[in-house]
Image: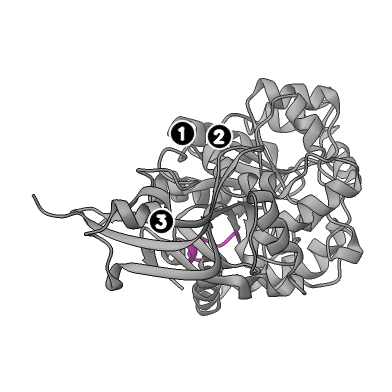
Amino acid sequence: MAMRKLTFYRASILNPLNDLDCEFWEDGVLIVEQKRDGSSVICEILPYLEACSRYVEEFGRSNLFEFPNSVIVPAFFDMHFHWVQDDVRLMPKDSLLQWLEKYTFPTEAKFSNKKFAKQKAKVFFQKLARYGTLGGACYSSVHDHALDYAMNEVKGDVLIGNVLMTMQSPKNLKQEEKVAVKSAIRGMKMYKHRYVLTPRFAIATDAHTMSVTSKEANKRKIFKQTHLSETPAEIKFVMELYKDQVGFKNVKSYTEIYHKVGMLGSRSLMGHAIHLSPTELKLLKKTKTNLVHCPTSNAPKRELGLGSGLFDFKKIEKYGIPWALGSDIGGGPFLSMLDVIRSFVQQHQRAGRSKATYTKGLYRSTLAGAEILGVSERVGNLVAGKEANFVIIKRPAGKFKDAEGVLKKLITSTKSRSLFDKLIVATYWRGQAIK
């Protein structure tokens, strides 16, 4: 019988299981097996000494990689980000709607140039992988070719959709309804379940376009994403827009508008979801809609966010609504999910929510996203049989008792938020280093 082809990675190891539990090996070995078909899957994790004794014959210099003062974690899931907004991450943020008008829309309009869009896609998705993100949900611009370039460059389980913008939008981004519908259906046909239907939000996408494309997405079992209740000004604008529209005169909330056009459901991702009434929460629960918390984007302006408010995860969980974390590039200033975890913990602990731990942050930026996207049997954490998608991160020297201790030290010891990418030693996708 032929010997299995195994590779051994020695470091500290973190394997998130849920909000409260994260397995931790101070000195562990992640064992990866390469299958005959070329795929690489996780075999098991063992303490180093046990791995040495159990795999005496398989251990060798060529297949043992040691990473002292490093920690292995699953590849990250960023459940809400805009790849076409990378250039506006650090632009002044007076308010959401002003920031969109002044910086974001002019930047996205540049993607009409194919050469520009192609080069930007190559650079961005290489950077995304370097940061350790191999899963999530991404917004593109309105341009079909920008979507195509993004799909060609992205690695991992990242859904991407071109935004639909048919009203209240700049002339150089605004689409006719039939053009928006045609574009969305093209994306669904071409990319199938890699595509995510993406009406920008109820301000920029008319009800008919949302309704027609939602039905098509539901028929094809394709995910949908948009923005919900990020700021009070946004909510007020939405309600003013729809109050006189046929079929919406009696609508009481932003969430109900999305419900009427078919945008809610178990394959729906609602970004931000900060300012929600109990009635809206009940509707989100009833429809099994998923939410995405973007702490760095919604953070106070002094922390480089838009100052939109703080997602109340305690209340969301009380209603039993699934949620995960996202960077919201470029509302969020940095692409690293380590920075998102840092912001999540700091903001919520300031608000007195002691259950906002680094362990919870890691779970909500890895396995929780995979669970929402329905791919957790294959990816999301470091369980035997799953794809070998993981990130090796530098950590401070010293002994640690548990996952919370090592994560806290790693994240809070970083001198600048812009330096989290410097901690990434390597990203492995399907068992191959891509950094």
Q: Residues within 10 Å of mark 3 (few under 14, many from 20)?
A: few
Q: Are marks 1 and 3 in contact (CB under 8 Å)?
A: no
Q: Quadrant of residue 266?
A: top right
Residue 49: assigned label: 3
Q: Are marks 2 and 3 in contact (CB under 8 Å)?
A: no
Residue at x 90%, y 49% (from the top left corner): 350
Between circles 1 and 3, the one closer to the viewer is: 3
Which residue type does callout 3 highlight? Leu
Q: Are marks 1 and 2 in contact (CB under 8 Å)?
A: yes
The residue segment tinted magenta is 140-150
Is any part of residue 181 visible from this angle? no
Which residue type does callout 1 highlight? Lys
Residue at x 50%, y 79% (from the top left corner): 115
Q: Nearer the viewer, residue 393 or 24?
A: 24
Q: Nearer the viewer, residue 57 or 169?
A: 57
Q: Is residue 169 above or below residue 302?
A: above
Is any part of residue 18 visible from this angle? yes
Question: Which residue corresponds to mark 1?
Answer: 221
Percent x, y of residue 69: 57, 69
Percent x, y of residue 24: 56, 49
Whether residue 375 sits left or right of residue 244 in the image: it is: left
